[in-house]
Image: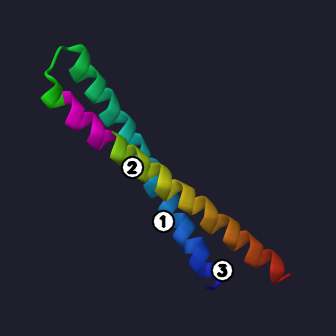
Amino acid sequence: MNKNKHYRNWMIQAPLGLVILGFGVCLVAESAILKAAGASCMQWVPAGTISLCVFNSGVCIFGNSILERVRYERQAEQEK
């Protein structure tokens, strides 16, 4: 894979991962508010589970963007 593709993947995945990660944090907080308000388990448990899935997806996408950046920098260094 050429270095420009790694760079493009990094440019797309880094902001996307951060946005999804932040959205997941907001959803986790919303689930915590539901629990604190005394909502039934049938409301806050599924909401909390989905929010953790969204949060972890953001972490994975952002983590992959870091790998893409490292690959880009390694290939750029090898071309020197």
Tag shown at residue 3: 3
Side of 39 relative to 69 (left or right) = left
Residue picked out by circle 2: 20
- Kindly give the residue lying farthest to the right in the view shown: 80
Which region shows up in magenta? 44-51
Query: Which residue type carries mark 1?
Result: Ile
Per the model, the C-alpha gap separating discs 3 and 1 is 14 Å
The answer to which of marks 3 and 2 sits earlier in the sequence is 3
* Residue 48 counted in the magenta span: yes
Query: Which residue type carries mark 3?
Result: Lys
Camera-nearest residue between 46 and 77: 46
Whether residue 19 can be seen here:
no
At a point 30% along the width and 23% down the height, the residue shown is 32
Where does the image place residue 77, in percent across and percent down from the top left? 81, 75
How many C-alpha atoms fall within 10 Å of the one at disc 3: few (<14), some, or many (≥20)?
Answer: some
For label 2, the SS is helix
Residue picked out by circle 1: 12
The answer to which of marks 3 and 1 sits earlier in the sequence is 3
Camera-nearest residue between 3 and 71: 71
Per the model, the C-alpha gap separating discs 1 and 2 is 12 Å
* Residue 71 counted in the magenta span: no
